[in-house]
Image: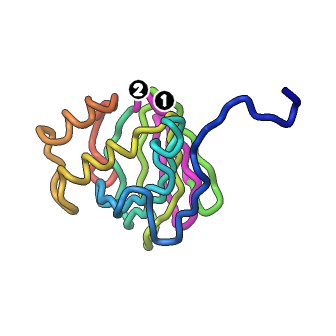
Amino acid sequence: MNSNENPVTTNIPTFVVKAGKDRIGGTLHVFDAQISVKISSHDTRGAFAVMETSTPPKSGPPLHLHQREDEWWYILDGNFLFEDGNTFHAGPGDTVFAPRRTRHTFQNVGTVPGRALVTVVPGGFEMFFQEISAAVLPGARLDPVVILPIFQKYGLEFLGPPLNKR
């Protein structure tokens, strides 16, 4: 084999996801955010997934911890406050990385929706978002009886309320 040959044949076709479109058939509504899966774990044989998120002002997820995934955000628009035991701000062009087993949360502290590209490694976390989106209506109160089994199924620990509820 010469150095230009790739010993691994992926059989994964090249694809384009047009603006406003996704890979799973619709936008997900999770903890007040809208999530569009741009590259699913099915596209990458489980290696990673990429999502575009839109988080309304003063919103964000509950404090949680991933047992399985590293999570990376690239902020496109808006201003966010992240918390992992310490607090720090991130705005357009900033990158935030939370390794697996790191407790974290964030809140859009701006006055307009905040957008980010989010990558999780390994993939599969988008399936958690699909299940939460199906189980909890937009704007509904977080019912532990409903969400905790989904958290556990995907190796997440629910550690506390979102920043806006503290």
Residue 125 higher or lower than 30, as above or below:
above
Q: Residue at x 61, y 38 (%)?
A: 10
The residue where tag 2 is placed is: 67
**What amino acid does circle 2 point to?**
Gln
Q: How is the image coloured?
A: rainbow
For mark 2, give the secondary structure: loop
Residue where numbered disc 1 is placed: 100
Task: Give the magenta-colored segment's residue range.
Answer: 66-89
| Mark 1 residue type | Arg
The residue that appears at 45% across and 68% down in the rendered structure is 21
The answer to which of 102 and 53 lies nearer the viewer is 53
Task: Say if mark 1 contacts mark 2, CB within 8 Å.
Answer: yes
The numbered dot on residue 25 is none
Q: Is residue 76 above or below residue 122?
A: below
Q: Which residue is painted at 67% across and 31% down in the image? A: 8
Q: Is residue 17 magenta?
A: no
The furthest residue to the left: 145
Q: Examine the image and state in which quarter residue 47 appears.
A: top right
Q: CA distance from mark 1 to mark 2?
A: 6 Å
Q: Position of residue 75 (x, y in %)?
A: 57, 58
Q: Position of residue 145 (x, y in %)?
A: 11, 38
Q: Is residue 56 above or below residue 51?
A: below
- x, y percentage for residue 111? 43, 72
Image quadrant occupied by the N terminus: top right
Within 10 Å of disc 1 (Cα), the crowding (few <14, some 14-19, many 20+) is some
Can you give x and y, in whole percent of width and height, for residue 116 in the image? 52, 59
135 sits to left or right of 113: left
